[in-house]
Amino acid sequence: MVGIRNTEQAGYEVIFRQDDVEIRNYHQLIVAETEIDADYTQAGSIGFNRLAGYIFGKNIQKQSMAMTSPVYREAISEKIAMTAPVLQQKTQEKWSMAFVMPSEYSLETLPEPLDPLVMIKSIPSKKVAVLIYSGTLSAERISDKSQQLIAWLKANQYTPLSDARSAAYDPPWTIPALRRNEIHIDID
């Protein structure tokens, strides 16, 4: 099956394009975000269902909102202070997922989530490097494409200001070859 990309998308202007990489100026966004303690696959399902519940009426006002794109997903790395001796230890995976809210809403007019794990945030306008690709979304593929974008940034003398995050534009039933996926890294 083919997904139809007819949802509102986050607003931006392309200021540079080279092959599959774009430099964009993003407008201010409002997102509904949640953090999930689970592996990549479970986090995707849990996060999507939690945020979809919010936009489809699981809020104080019982108000439904339109789905928008992209859906952002990012691994959350724990920042800890450097100490001696250095010990390495695998920590649980933690992911962040965010839905961009429809542009007709402001922080003041968005319905209040019933689920305390859904947070509403304002993201200021910023410059973002983007690698566009199609195919499946997996933790390995996101990591590989993130490394490609990081290498491109380094080769082109851009300074990354954030970790890489995934942006997905299509429903999961879209044929992988027709999906629009992106890796985003904020830059100066």
Image (spheres, rainbow, N blue to C red):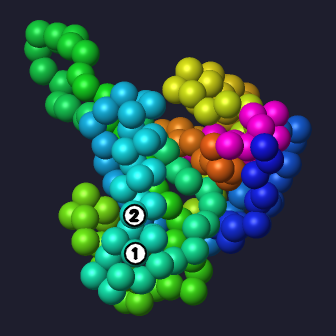
Q: Are marks 2 and 1 in contact (CB under 8 Å)?
A: yes
Which residue is nearer to you in this view: 6 or 83?
A: 6
x 85%, y 48%: residue: 17
Residue 159 is situated, as x and y percent measured from the top left of the image, at 58, 41
Q: Residue furthest right?
A: 19
x 36%, y 56%: residue: 50
Quadrant the N terminus occupies: top right
Query: Which image quarter: residue 7?
Result: bottom right
Q: Is residue 79 left or right of residue 139?
A: left
Query: Which image quarter: residue 153?
Result: top right
Instruction: Find out whether residue 184 is within the magenta segment.
Output: yes
* Residue 129 appears in view: no
Q: Is residue 89 left or right of residue 161?
A: left
Which residue is nearer to you in this view: 155 or 47?
A: 47
Which stretch is magenta?
173-188
Q: Is residue 1 above or below residue 110?
A: above
x 63%, y 61%: residue: 69
Q: Is residue 6 above or below residue 98?
A: below
Which residue is nearer to you in this view: 186 or 82?
A: 186
Residue 97 is situated, as x and y percent measured from the top left of the image, at 43, 50
Q: Residue furthest front?
A: 1
**Alpha carbons under labels 2 and 1: distance apart:** 6 Å
Which residue is nearer to you in this view: 88 or 86?
A: 88
Residue identified by numbered label 2: 53
Residue identified by numbered label 1: 57
Q: Is residue 110 left or right of residue 132?
A: left
Give the class, few, some or many, for how many residues have Cα within 10 Å of label 2's Cα (few <14, many ≥20): some
